[in-house]
Image (tube, rainbow, N blue to C red):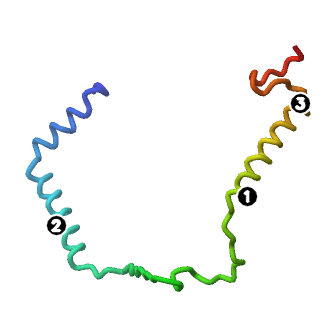
């Protein structure tokens, strides 16, 4: 028999015996539904959401108190980053930050 025609042969057999195939399918589905209805659940998940307001809303884990950054602190961080980049370009021997990052000596 030709290998390409084998699925057609299987369909032919199923259609010839469709009442038997329908009975087998029905029995399997009914067994599955009966199991789902009669089986006791083995696992049950439980979840709780605790919402607190006020000072109790932040957990106390022994952390050190944090301080807010002032605008001058932020400015200092930005300027130090700029100085580090400028120093990096000087150490590499690059010239002219405004002219692009060329590594040639010209």
Q: Residue at x 53, y 84 (%)?
A: 55
Quarter holding residue 53: bottom left
Instruction: Report which residue position mark 3 lands on.
Output: 92
Label 3: few (<14), some (14–19) or many (≥20) C-alpha neighbours in 10 Å: few
- Residue 47 is left or right of residue 34, and the answer is right
Query: Looking at the picture, how far across and down is residue 75, in whole percent?
Result: 72, 51
Front residue of this view, candidates 73 and 45: 73
- Tell me if 65 is positioned left or right of 19 in this view: right
- Name the residue that disc number 1 marks: 73
Vertical relation: 9 (above or below) 44: above
Q: Position of residue 99 (x, y in %)?
A: 75, 21
The answer to whether 55 is drawn above or below residue 102 in the figure is below
Checking the image for residue 30, the label placed there is 2
Q: Residue at x 52, y 85 (%)?
A: 56
**Do the residues under discs 3 and 1 have CB atoms within 8 angstroms?**
no
Mark before the other along the chain sequence, 2 or 1:
2
Mark nearer the N terminus (2 vs 3)? 2
Circle 1: is it few (<14), some (14-19), or many (20+) Cα within 10 Å? few
Q: Quadrant of the C terminus?
A: top right
Q: How many marks?
A: 3
**Residue shown at 29% from the left, 82% from the top:** 40
Discs 2/3, front = 3
Q: Is residue 54 left or right of residue 69?
A: left
Q: Between label 2 and label 1, give the one nearer the viewer.
A: 1
Q: Categorize mark 2 by other alpha carbons within 10 Å: few (<14), some (14-19), many (20+).
A: few
Q: Which type of secondary structure does the marked residue at label 1 adopt?
A: helix
Separation of residues labelled 2 and 3 (CA atoms): 77 Å
Label 2 close to label 3 by CB (< 8 Å)? no
SS of the residue under disc 2 = helix
In the rendered structure, the answer to whether residue 14 lies left or right of residue 72 reads left
Indicate which disc, 3 or 1, sits on the residue closer to the N terminus. Answer: 1
């Amino acid at each position: 028999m030709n290998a390409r025609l084998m699925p057609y042969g299987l369909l032919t057999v199923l259609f010839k015996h469709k009442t038997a195939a329908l009975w087998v399918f029905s029995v399997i589905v009914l067994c599955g539904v009966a199991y789902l209805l009669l089986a006791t659940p083995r696992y049950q998940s439980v979840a709780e959401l605790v919402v607190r307001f006020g000072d109790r809303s932040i957990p106390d884990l022994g952390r050190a108190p944090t301080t807010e950054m002032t605008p001058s602190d932020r400015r200092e961080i930005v300027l130090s980053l700029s100085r580090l980049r400028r120093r990096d370009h000087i150490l590499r021997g690059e010239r002219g930050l405004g002219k692009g990052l060329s590594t040639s000596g010209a």
